[in-house]
Image (cartoon, rainbow, N blue to C red):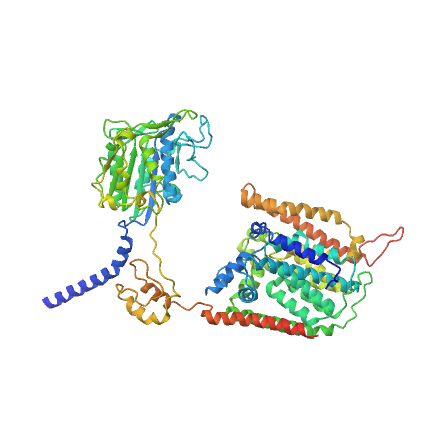
Amino acid sequence: MDSDTDYAFPALVAARLLLASAPLPDALKYDQQLSSPLTSYSRLREGIYLFQHGVDPYSGGAFRHSPLLLSLFSTVLPLTPYTSPLLWTAADAVAAWALVRIWRLRTGAKKTSRDRQIAALYLLNPYIFLPSLALSTSSIENMLCLLALMFACRGRTSASLLSLATLLQLSLPSILLLAPVLLLNITRPVSRLALPQPMDAPLKRVIPLIVEFLGYSALLTFASTLVCGNWSWVEKTWGASLTLPDLTPNPGLWWYFFTEMFDHFRPFFLMVFSVHLLIYVAPLCIKFQHDMLYAAFLLIGVLAVFKPYPTLSDPGLFLSMFSIFPEIYPYLRHPIVTALIHLHASLLLPLFNSLWLRQGTGNANFFYASTLVFGMGNGAALLDAIWAGLRIAIGELKEGYEVAQE
Amino acid sequence: MIVLSRLIFLVLVCVACLVKAQYEPVTDFFGRQGSSHTNNWAVLVCSSRYWFNYRHMANALGMYRTVKRLGIPDSNIILMLADDAACNPRNKFPGCVYSSSAKTLDLYGDNIEVDYRGYEVTVENFLRVLTGRVEPSVPRSKRLLTDDRSNIFIYMTGHGGNEFLKFQDSEEISAFDIADAVAQMWEKKRYNELFFMIDTCQANTMYSKFYSPNVLATGSSVIHENSYSHENDRDIGVAVIDSYTHYVLEYMEGINKTSQATMQDLFDTYDPDKINSHPGVRSDLFPRSLRHTLVTDFFGGVAQAEVLPSVYAAPFSNISGATAAEADPEVEGEGITELEAVGVLDSQPFIAALARAPESALGAPLARNTRTWATSGIVLLLVGWIASRK
């Protein structure tokens, strides 16, 4: 992990633990920016309670977590007011550690001076630690995502595919990350953004990995079905991302659209929105085949903007991952504008949410507008990252030359 | 022929006995406390407007607060205030209505639902509310949606006289009108028991004309006698509460939802010297004894609840015994050894019915536990196996 002389990481984790034990988290548990219907801690507790009393938690609309979480938290890891903050802080610590390792594997160094900053940028990022304080399971999803990427960078394919399979069980839109993780397993994570070349590894090597991934997914699906005893969980967990039954407001772009939609058009637009997520996979993986980690990073950004039930953790992960690509910083076109839009949106989101739902002096349009600004901020960051990732290949400009897109 | 008719008679008697046997526990449950009502309603009317009748509005609001505190929800209260004292420009304490010069309790508060306000408080509307003959466009909150198991508390206050009550300084309702309206309510089965309280001058004359059953009435003063206000407030500038209502509310402050105080206790606290008038009670139309009628039967929204022992506590071996006992509801639950059956109601039929219900969709607790541990085991084994490889 880190050497004995480096106290930054334990200090950060300790700071997070302290924060988690403060009375603040109680007010955050029900905040709609920090947890969605798919990740909310109170729904998780309710599902576990119902399950332990013999009621099928998937028979109602309250519980949408994966059955794996149901079984894990009702047996091995009980959720109490003392253990839950510890668990979530541990998840964040593991995620930060994974991010630092990804960085180290990318630069090829055993220890760098930026390690502390990267860990801090993850653990102290408000978009990350606020949902973690609210005990939203999106922190666990972030941890699994970063673990999958880290194991792929290290070349431990089985571990990476298992992490991804588990992530898929928790959140269906993560299927977008399958292609980059598979390809990352067969390529090296070292930064090659500046030297784009066609992929040197043969694609044939992906096929056994796909089979292995499908095997793990099938095993986990079987385990999930074993807990429930029937298949009703599929419709409630994965089906929720596809059919959007719960229109609780969240910082995403889907919910308002679908509150206003006539039922006649609903299936069509659900299909459009879902396929829209999938169309980014192929182009980004092809364009960035020389640096699959960057493609994974961009797809995490796509998920942050266009996911069905996002929380603040998803853009949080995307923004924190900027820290492991310092080579693109000189080529970002509008980082300050993006940062200011984010600042703007992050202040407006809770304000308009409260104005609408608590004080009653605003309406849903206020909050919707703030989610649009937030989406713009995330989209601006994503576009800038794509541009910078491509622009870096062109390098320094000579006098009189400029970069133009054909 | 005679034998056949005797046989039919016998069969009918047996059926009647069986039905009665099934009927008994139900009536017994509802009649246990003496009262047979299942829900409570309140109609609180302040019929006078203008600032100097502040005390009438405080009367009605004091009663409103009391019945709400004792459990009648806003949906079951029809509050009629002929004028708005709280937002009157002459009110030195805007948005507040006080019933004592100590001003410790704001009756208007921040959670109040006035159903008929201002000029909507008319004799016609009051009678329509009582009889239920309202326009189709009248919203639910302004209707008295009672049934034959409802206990209704009607409170009226304002300026009145010998067999009349003045509404809005422009019209009046007579005791005959109210009596006829209550008779209509009885015909239409719109109440189980009705308690009529009135605080005006010569109030007792207003209830003298009732002729429907199950009506209990009380008023603040006899014929030829005025009812007086209780207290003036120097800041508000007018009297803030009437004497009779003040003492009734003072008594009610000592009542909570679980109180076993009876109506006779309430009427026993009437003190003509303190109230400055002679309150009266009319109970000849009321079937029950006032010593067995709880105050909360009219003022509160107290529901009957019977605590049954938990389903899973009963040993499953009693299913066969329970099904046999189900047909005969008089049998006490002998099979339940761990928990006592609370109350007279026999819980065996319920438990038997629940036991016969389809199995939990998730299976018996043991199987569920095993499956959960198996799943966690699979996941952890997988993680461990992967971790140990390479």
Seen at 67% across and 70% down, the residue is A159
Instruction: Indicate the position of residue B336 as horizontal and vertical percent values.
Output: 33, 66
Q: How many labels does the image show?
A: 0
B230 or B188, nearer to the observer: B230
Measured along the vertical axis of the image, is residue A399 above or below residue A275?
A: above
Observer-nearest of B303 and B123: B303
Residue B151 at what x, y percent from top left?
30, 45
- Residue that extends furthest to the right in the rendered view of this protein: A399
Residue nearest the observer in this picture, A116 or B143: A116
| Image point (76%, 63%), residue name | A104
Q: In this view, does A240 lie to the left or right of B278?
A: right
The N terminus of chain B lies in quadrant:
bottom left
Give coordinates of residue B196: x percent, y percent: 28, 38
Which quadrant: the C terminus of chain B? bottom right
The answer to whether one can see residue A128 in this image is no
Tell me residue B147's x, y (percent).
Answer: 31, 48
- Image quarter for residue B252? top left
Can residue B278 be seen here? The reply is yes
Q: Quadrant of residue B330?
A: bottom left
As drawn, is B180 to the left or to the right of A117?
left
Left or right of A89, for residue B362: left
Question: Going by the picture, which residue comes out furthest to the front?
Answer: A5
